[in-house]
Amino acid sequence: MNNRTIQRFIPYFKPYRGILFTDLFFAALTTVCELAFPLIFRQLTNLGLQDAGQITITMIGQLGGTYLVLRIVEIFATYYMQNIGHVMGARIEKDMRRDLFSHLQTLSDNFYNNTKVGQIMTRITADLNDITEFAHHCPEEFFIAGIKILISFIILLRINLPLTLIIYTLIPMMIYFASSYRRQLKRSFMDQRHHIGELNAGIEDSLLGVRVVKSFANEEVEKQKFEEGNEEFLSIKKRTYKNMAGFSVVNRLFDGLMNLSVLIIGGFFLMNGTITAGDLVAYVLYVTTLLATVRRIIEFTEQFQRGMTGIERFLEIMDIKSDIVDAPDAVELGEIRGEITFDNVSFQYLDHKEWVLKDIDLEIKPGQNIAIVGPSGGGKTTLCNLIPRLYDVTEGAIRIDGIDIRDIQLKSLREKIGMVQQDVYLFSDSVFDNIEYGKPGASREEVHQAAKLAGAYEFIMDLPEGFDTYVGERGVKLSGGQKQRISIARVFLKNPPILILDEATSALDNTSEKLVQKSLEQLAKGRTTLTIAHRLSTIRNADTIVVLTDDGIEEIGNHEELLAQKGMYYELHRLGSEWIGALVG
């Protein structure tokens, strides 16, 4: 799995390969500079033991000057690695976050219906935070380690073959025993990331529902739920640190074995004259460097596993394919009349066996105003959501002006459709920005005109900063009617030929409903309109009323025709109920 993960990660280096190769070049320079010092010291030591008289000020100056130059080169190279190298890692992290966010935009409602937003947020933020260090240090650390181990091995072989073979036999053993902890660390990090996502999801749920929490005086319940999750996260962290402690023990154990081998065997060779004192000093310095390198690689395993965990969780999302995609030969939708045809349409959710809609046949003429009524759960919203392909039909086809919507480019299709829903979503931005969202780049005059058409201009101008007023999280600073009229202004600005009104006034009081209903009537003029209604008063003037139940289309006709049929719609009207939601059976 690791090899496959790395292979899929490597392409992210491509735009920065110049920086990467320069970084590795400077990494090689720092390594050569570091490895040169023991040789300089070895030369000085051996010469001093053989004949101290040969050591002159000139020689010391030459050796010192050489080391100074190497040190300056190393400092410059280190600065580049720490600065530019880290920036490269940050850029790769940025690119991956961009790709992940772009991919999330393509996923269908089925994905979001089954995935917690907190989990998604963790993957796009915390999971990718470790990518900067991983992308920079992973190639650098292994490259440096490879150079140090190889050059040290060659130099040590020339100094003393038997001792070198003994030392290098211990390194694979060290790596072998450390690998089991590496696997455990990987599992621990995966558990950590998953649980952080769950914790974030719980926090988000609690904070977004804070008014419900307070209204039921359930603060202690939320605290207890959070504490349980917090304690579980602590237990995962404890397991992680236990594995990290195991790494440390393995590291120190083999450190000791290598130093002990050099001390005993090196001392024995020195006693027998097999090795000189200068060579032994150089040997000790190289072994110290070697141990530091192996230790660094082992310690880097934690960072490596964090990075790998982040990449794997990134790829898990990237591997999810949307079930709503453009066909290879999808066409762009030009000017349309707005005719919509449901041809034997049936639908069921991917994870459900029950049919939500079954064998729906319906023809909507251009500019026609269609009202859809029926009991809760009858599929009214689902029927409308199929038109912009928030979901795809399971059977049958939906056509716009005779073209199957699956043969139309998604962007082109959705640009022709405006939706006003019961649950209005406003972004945490200004009033202007929320309206302008309907037509990015629209002028201030266009936004003002859209607000006037939606009947929102006057109340907006009464706000503290007019169109520049911040609406708060999800528009919390505005009333329900104000939010709804802003959402209507947004659709006015978009100016689509097809309009879907999904119970757009059901959550409003009578006064607000009258204002919004007037705006909706203005918006619907000249457009093909589908209205999901909850009050009879809002649909009397519809060209056609469709009564939709679990069994499909029960009745269809205008207000007078349906009353004359004396069926389900008639019964509701006879009872004098204003609420379509009361319709059952």
Image: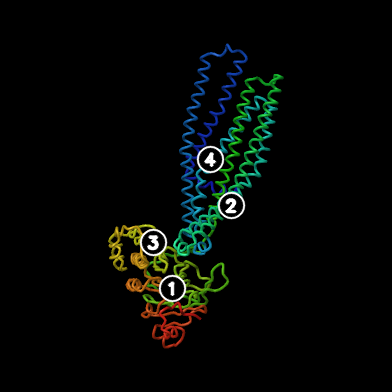
Q: Is residue 500 visible?
A: no
Q: Nearest the camera: 103 or 562?
A: 562
Label whose residue precedes the other's in the sequence (1 or 3): 1
- Which numbered disc, 1 or 3, marks the residue closer to the eye? 3
Q: Earlier in the sequence, mark 2 or mark 1?
A: 2
Q: CA distance from mark 4 to mark 2?
A: 24 Å
Is residue 483 visible from the viewing direction of this image? yes
Image height check: is 3 above or below 367? above
The residue tagged 2 is 191
Badge count: 4
**Three-letter code, disc 4:** His
Which of the two discs, 3 and 4, sits closer to the camera? 3
The residue carrying mark 1 is: 402
Residue 476 — which label?
A: 3
Of residues 88 and 336, the one drawn nearer to the viewer in this rendering: 88
Looking at the image, which residue is at 59% across and 15% down? 48
Q: Could you tell me the amino acid type at mark 3?
A: Val
Q: Three-letter amino acid code at disc 1?
A: Gly
